[in-house]
Image (cartoon, coloured by chain):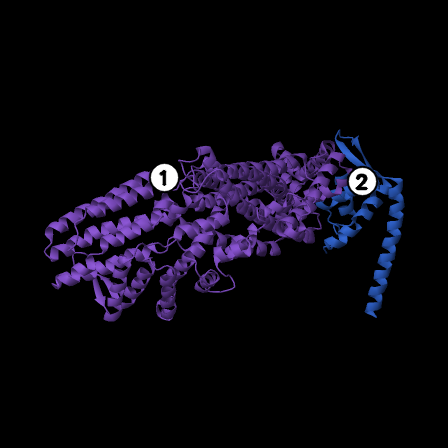
Chain colours: A blue, B purple
Amino acid sequence: MKIDSDLMRGVTPSVILNLLKARKMYGYEMIKVVNERTNNVFQWKEGSLYPCLHKLESSKLIQSEWLTAANGKRRKYYSLTSNGLEVLDAKKAELNLFLHSVNTLFENALI
Amino acid sequence: MVKVDLDRFLDQLTAGLKADRELRMEVRQELATHIMDRYEDNLRMGLSDAESYEQAIKAFGNILELSDQLTEANMERMSSKSKFYRTCTALLIPALVICAFVMYFPGANIIKGMACVIKDKHGEQIFFDIFSDLEQADRSDSSRFTAAQRLILYGDLSHKNKSDRLKAVCDEFPQNKAFHAEYTGFLVSETDHYDKNNKEIRNAVKVGKEIDPNNALYNYILANYLFSRSCNMEYSAKTVIGTRLKITNRTAFDQALEEYHKGTQKKFYRNYAKELTLKRMQIFGKSYHFLDNLYFLVQNAKEPDPHVNYMCHIPVFVWTYAYQQAEAGNKVNVLKAVAPYKSYINQLSSGTNTLAGQSSAARLCADGARFIPEIYKRTGLKKQAAEVQNILSNTAQKIRTAIKKELKESSSQSIRSYMPWVTSVFCHYYSWDKFSRQQLLNGMAIEYIFAAKYWVVVMNTVLLMMIIGYIAAAFHYHRITGQKAVLLAPSARFIGKMLFFGVFIPVVTFFLVSNIHFLSGQNINIACNYPKFILQCLLLLAVILCIISTMIRNHISKRCTELDIRAANNDKTTLFLKFKYAFFIVLTTMAYFPLEFFTGNDIEVYKTAAWQLGVTGVIFIFLFALAAAVRSVIKLRKDKAAAIYYGSYAKTMVPVLALAVIVITAVIIPAIDLREQLLVKQDEAVYSSEGYYFPGELKLINFMKEAISSGLNKLPPVR
């Protein structure tokens, strides 16, 4: 099933922050991880990832550095800032509340 | 994978970040690494090299949309230089609004100097005059005159009919011979009055005879009126003179003949046309108001010497009648009818101080040379017939040669040949004899500046309409993609383009326009070249707009990759651009080189055809533009890719066009106005020191009078 792009766009920043909480990652890696973990339900494209990444960096929620990988390639790795961590917690709570509310609404609607 | 293609793709993707080179390089490198990673993965999955590359690029989606998203996302991080550019671009919009506001609402002249955009020297609104007819232009222009001056110029404007307006002037000045002559002449020139206002014409003639008893004018006016009502003139191949008269009302015809004879016995003939026109010219002012004067003459005076037409017709009625009487063997009636012709032509020649009047007298000499000998021959006066033919035709020929010689070097040859009445009034303004060429060019430059102001407003209006269209497209783009289309930070290179197209091009255009009379071989007198000048301006506008739109379209088109939805149109775009460049060359050539430059023929040959072609062309272009606009709107509404394309296009077009409008409104117009003021000052200094008559004109009138008089004196008396 394909998820609506507007819905996807809304959660993309939270997903990125959550990924970076675990470890530093580069753009392409994030796409691969998300697509794998969601069994391609989330079909992330570069077109939606990079503007979001750059916006988060501009907002100082994440930071970047150029590192050399084991294969010798230089890549731009992103990591979470302390601000980003706080926002992530807030976003998580917000998202949980949202999902809970949506579920409640849907369950009541079925009754 | 071809590196060049990747570089091009990355260039286009990061085009909005050009203002911050370091940031752009970083983003570029990041995206390049990403593409390489995906490309390698694709190869490992078994795709071919080309497919791997294509899939890696395709994953980025619509390039224009992503480019804008990246620009917007990085806006905060861009350097202060880009913020400065962004601020400047954003400031264009309020500046544009101010310019538009000032241009279209003269009450809002908050920026001194801009008011001239739509106002002429007397505060009249030029823009609205473009769309008003000439009659309205007269009325709007009349506000600068006093009530007394308006009465002399236009008559009483409270009346709808021209005859009532003129009658009101006669009522105001009951003893004024000139006003009454004009009123009576106008009555007979209006065909409606032939049937409806018989009484009015007779009354006017009666009053005219009372206030000006020695003037033959009213006899001739009545004679012409009665001839027109009492007989029909037909062309007839059977007669040697080529005409035949059918009398329908014998009483009225005899009365007409009687009025003709009475007129030839009067002391003089005067129609006061020139005196009135000169009086009005004095009120109108200097050559600056040349166009006003033309409007005035065409709409109000019809001709400064409206009497010359019927004065030429009257003898033809009489001579045709005499010819028919001669054929019938009625010798007494023949000689009675023909005898006064010398007096008639003499009266016309000596009583008329216009070239038109003299030309009419000369024409009567030529007609007389054709009619009178034939009449004499049929009454047995063969010797006199030969003598009359010889003298009258020689006189007419001599005058024709003199006119041709005198006017050959004149500035407004074509207008003079078609409208000798204009010559008789205006030639003192454009005389070669009196003023230096520089002074004449000075006067001409003023006329062109006056005309250029119309063009400026038209051009600004077109640009504003384009801006509105692009802003609408940008909003649609914003609605569909969520991107801030219009005010995204432009790159340094884009600023350069904006300066080039928004500042350099308008400045150069106006330099060309203000000097177009030097560049395009225009003649001294704008009146005969005015249509050509307007055509050149319009062509120039078309060229400028085409260049701007082509260059920007080219710029946008380069941003589209093979994978973009618009890629299919790239070939068409290239072809279109090639065609457009050829179109520029043709238009520019047409604009700057008149047709006679290539062919050596007189422009008059092409004028009619050009007008017809031009009007047809304008209608077609308008319909084509309308169809294209409708097509674009439909496409824009249905097609997301088109919305992105035009929205992105708008991002480039709006600031460029806005800057052009601002430069034209705030810099070029005041500059033109300043130049105009300087030229008018110089012009007034020249004209304030001069009298009215143009030596060449006086010389010619005197020559014609002398030639006609001496020619007539040589003629044998009619017994």
Q: Residues within 10 Å of mark 1 (few under 14, many from 20)?
A: some
Q: Secondary structure at mark 1?
A: helix
A25 or B421: nearer the viewer:
B421
Quadrant of residue B177 in the image? Answer: bottom left
Position of residue A46 measured from the top left corner of the image (x, y, whole percent) = 71, 43
Position of residue B429 measured from the top left corner of the image (x, y, whole percent) = 44, 41
Q: Is residue B66 visible?
A: no
Q: Residue at x 20, y 62 (%)?
A: B321
Q: Secondary structure at mark 2?
A: helix
Dot 2: chain letter: A
Residue type, mark 2 in image: Glu
Residue type, mark 1 in image: Gly
Q: Residues within 10 Å of mark 2 (few under 14, many from 20)?
A: many
Left or right of B710 in this view: B128: right
The alpha-carbon separation of the residues under discs 2 and 1 comes to 84 Å
Left or right of A5 in this view: B689: left
B87 or B251: nearer the viewer:
B251
Q: Are marks 2 and 1 on the same chain?
A: no
Left or right of B204 in this view: A48: right
B312 or A87: nearer the viewer:
B312
The quarter in which the N terminus of chain B is drawn is top right
Left or right of B452 in this view: B645: right
Q: Badge 2 is on which residue?
A: A57
The relative height of residue B612 versus residue B603 in the rendered view (above or below) is below
Position of residue A57 measured from the top left corner of the image (x, y, whole percent) = 80, 40
Q: Badge 1 is on which residue?
A: B696
